[in-house]
């Protein structure tokens, strides 16, 4: 199909996918009350999950979901960067390499051989890397999945050339605000809240569960102190390594902490 | 995307990036001398290797990790993985906890089906590129769709904590069970949802469907007492009737060159279909009376063999999901505790549930400490790939003379009939594409 040039004056929004589960871009479609208003304010120029229509770049705002895992994708992201005024990485895959970055800790050829009848067809990189590893990123929205209200705030901020209001503190702050009793203090449940970036609304503790870190590390997290606390609560090193090595395993602070405990096992 | 005629004798239909599907796929059809020569549903979703990195993880982590295979149907993965772990450890979850699982699953069906019916599929029938474009002329339909989707998401958010990758389900049940009072608010919404789904069915019945009935082997779960979602035996209309642990004896998975996702087929008979059409044709009598009646009223009998009509079947399932959810809420008693303690032991466990797109089968082996030794997952879309290609083949054969743009669009629609979740189907594979 031809890609017509834009006819509208509205800012152009594009949504791109790399290795991911589609959950972050789905968050945009999950804005049931706001979606049509968003579509009014911007021109949805490229969003294949939602529409067949394609409008040529350049784009005012590119949302990028997913991590880079193939040589082809490592090229493609540069083209997208060139076509985008603002480029925002959305979700743990795009900001930290995602769960698929677990390959970074193993020999990827072993992974491949394990599931392939014809490993020779496979083209994959040894590591899964975040978008910022390849190109300049204007903003990173953390979360697995991202919070849809933060996404809306981000879109509106960038299109109005202001700084998005995305607080950088820990999940603990959200718990306090919500009035949730600390699950670690009250029940001895290991919780990654103290080192995890806010944004989810501290859901897990409100459901009697410890935070499992799907929003990735907050700024300057004291992971070692928290890991000591986990040891006191009876967790072993293998379990602590797994805690830090799940949805944002490749984020620097979590990666270091998991490696430290892996070596203790 | 392009449709090209080379001289008078051959043409190719090529769609380089399929829109309105979840994930990355392409389409290639080649016709020569009025005969279809080649059909390929190409899938180039990058590899993510879930089965591989599940090895060495704790059995309690499998639901949250496998949820990340797919943001549209995380509950399917969480439930399949939980059931498999419970099976391995000799635990059965029943009563109020099972009811809550059923309820959250109804929410996922509603959210996923509403997304597909209104935003991904309906625009094809009405000739729009997407739902946003469609909203300009049909705002009421799109708004109703968004609201229905929201009702499904509200069920997910209350029971699961959030819509995408819920945090509340766990091996053994839920971290926290909702109170009666919390569920009451949902009931009102679901009652509205049921009416909206009924109206939607009337709307879908007015759409134009190509005359395209096919002969399929349908495979779905069957439960003795209910339209199976959570558990049951695997049955087909051609004689399959097996427990979960025998499924692999009857199917094979093939690594074909043009798709990054394995193709599944029945060893004895070849391609088979899973999903709403399979469930509907196999288990029609177990739909709630209201859903059956609504289907009858719009001329949809207990058998539906036209994949383009899957939009109606999904809508009937939305009515059913609201109906069942309302009933579950009506007789809800808060389970206490909200989960059964599951103690690991060495063994193999199986789990299979009806994801919105069809059966999603899991097998894990774990050791005495609950560490995962091996994982195998067969998602719905990889099972449907062969029938999708078969449909395209037959469709192009029959409608070759349609104007080319129209034919191409109908072919794309032929794929969207299956609501393919490519992210799911390629949770582990990738391959080098010949982009000639
Ligand atoms: S960050 Fe999580 S929710 Fe978002 S695409 Fe990646 S796996 Fe899916």
Image (cartoon, rainbow, N blue to C red):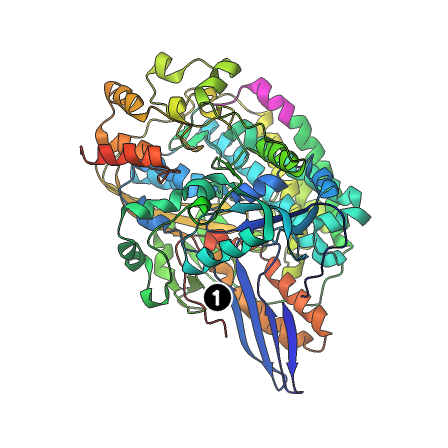
Image quadrant of residue A7? bottom right
Q: Is residue B179 magenta?
A: yes
For this rendering, which residue is in front, A57 or B192?
A57
Percent across and percent down for residue B134 are 75, 50
Q: Is residue B17 above or below residue A168?
A: below
x 64%, y 71%: residue:
B2
For this rendering, which residue is in front, B203 or B63?
B63
Does the image show residue B284?
A: no
What's the magenta bit mostly, secondary-structure-wise?
A: helix
Percent across and percent down for residue B45 are 47, 57
- Badge count: 1
Q: What chain is tagged by disc 1?
A: B
x 62%, y 73%: residue:
B13
Q: Is residue B147 magenta?
A: no
Percent across and percent down for residue B418 are 58, 57
Q: Tell me the element at label 1.
A: loop
The span shown in magenta is B177-186
x 49%, y 33%: residue:
B166
For this rendering, which residue is in front, B106 or B382?
B382
For this rendering, which residue is in front, A248 or A121?
A248
Which residue is under mark 1? B271
Q: Is residue B53 above or below residue B188?
A: below
Image quadrant of residue B55? top left
Percent across and percent down for residue B228 are 51, 44
Q: Is residue B294 above or below residue B386?
A: above
């Amino acid at each position: 199909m031809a890609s017509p040039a834009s006819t509208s004056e509205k800012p152009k929004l594009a949504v791109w996918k790399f290795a991911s589960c589609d959950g972050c871009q789905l968050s945009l479609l999950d804005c049931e009350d706001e979606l049509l208003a968003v579509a009014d304010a911007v021109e949805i120029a490229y969003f294949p999950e939602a529409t067949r229509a394609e409008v040529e770049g350049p784009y005012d705002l590119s949302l990028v979901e997913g991590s880079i895992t193939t040589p082809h994708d490592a090229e493609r992201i540069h083209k997208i960067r060139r076509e985008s005024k603002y480029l925002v990485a959305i979700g743990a895959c795009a900001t930290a390499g995602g769960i698929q970055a677990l390959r970074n800790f193993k020999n990827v050829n072993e992974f491949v051989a394990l599931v392939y009848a014809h490993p020779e067809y496979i083209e994959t990189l040894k590591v899964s890397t975040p978008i910022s590893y390849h190109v300049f990123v204007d903003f990173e929205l953390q979360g697995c999945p991202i919070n849809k209200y933060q996404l809306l705030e981000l879109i509106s901020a960038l299109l109005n050339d202001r700084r998005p209001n995305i607080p950088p503190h820990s999940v603990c702050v959200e718990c306090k605000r919500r009035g949730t009793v600390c699950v670690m203090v009250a029940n001895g449940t290991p919780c990654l809240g103290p080192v995890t970036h806010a944004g989810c609304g501290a859901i897990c503790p409100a459901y009697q569960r410890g935070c499992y870190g799907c929003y990735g590390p907050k700024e300057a997290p004291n992971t070692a102190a928290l890991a000591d606390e986990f040891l006191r609560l009876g967790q072993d090193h293998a379990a602590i390594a797994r805690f830090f090595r799940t949805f944002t395993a490749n984020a620097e602070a979590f990666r270091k902490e998991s490696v430290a405990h892996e070596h203790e096992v | 995307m392009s449709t090209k005629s080379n001289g008078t004798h051959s043409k190719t239909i090529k769609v380089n990036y399929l829109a309105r599907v979840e994930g990355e796929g392409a389409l290639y059809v080649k016709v020569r001398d009025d005969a279809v020569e080649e059909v390929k549903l190409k899938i180039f979703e990058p590899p993510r290797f879930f089965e591989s990195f599940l090895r060495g993880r704790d059995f309690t982590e499998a639901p949250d990790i496998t949820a990340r295979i797919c943001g549209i149907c995380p509950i399917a993965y969480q439930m399949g993985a939980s059931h498999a772990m419970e099976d391995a450890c000799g635990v059965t979850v029943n009563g109020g906890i099972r009811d809550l699982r059923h309820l959250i699953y109804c929410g996922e069906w509603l959210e996923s089906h509403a997304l597909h019916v209104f935003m991904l599929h309906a625009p094809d029938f009405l000739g729009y590129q997407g739902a946003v474009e469609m909203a300009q002329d049909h705002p009421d339909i799109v708004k109703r769709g968004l609201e229905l989707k929201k009702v499904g998401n509200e069920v997910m958010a209350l029971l699961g904590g959030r819509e995408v990758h819920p945090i509340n389900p766990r091996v053994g049940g839920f971290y926290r069970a909702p109170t009666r009072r919390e569920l009451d608010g949902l009931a009102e919404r679901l009652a509205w949802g049921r009416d909206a789904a009924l109206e939607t069915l009337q709307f879908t019945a007015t759409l134009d469907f190509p005359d395209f009935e096919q002969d399929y082997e349908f495979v779905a779960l069957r439960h003795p007492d209910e339209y199976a979602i959570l558990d049951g035996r695997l049955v087909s209309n051609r004689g399959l009737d097996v427990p979960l642990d025998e499924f692999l004896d009857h199917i094979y998975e093939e690594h074909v060159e043009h798709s990054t996702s394995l193709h599944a087929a029945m060893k004895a008979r070849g391609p088979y279909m899973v999903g709403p059409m399979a469930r509907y044709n196999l288990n029609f009598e177990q739909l709630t009376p209201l859903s059956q009646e609504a289907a009858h009223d719009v001329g949809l009998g207990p058998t539906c063999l036209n994949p383009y009509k899957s939009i109606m079947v999904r809508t009937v399932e939305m009515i059913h999901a609201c109906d069942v959810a309302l009933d579950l809420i009506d007789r809800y008693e808060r389970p206490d505790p909200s989960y059964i303690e599951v103690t690991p032991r060495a063994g193999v466990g199986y789990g299979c549930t009806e994801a919105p797109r069809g059966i999603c089968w899991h097998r894990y082996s774990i050791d005495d400490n609950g560490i995962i030794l091996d994982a195998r997952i067969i998602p719905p879309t990889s099972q449907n790939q062969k029938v999708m290609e078969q449909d395209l083949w037959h469709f192009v054969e029959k409608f070759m003379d349609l104007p080319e743009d129209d034919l191409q669009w109908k072919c794309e629609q032929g794929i969207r009939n299956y609501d393919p979740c490519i992210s799911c189907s390629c949770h582990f594979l990738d391959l080098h594409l010949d982009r000639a």
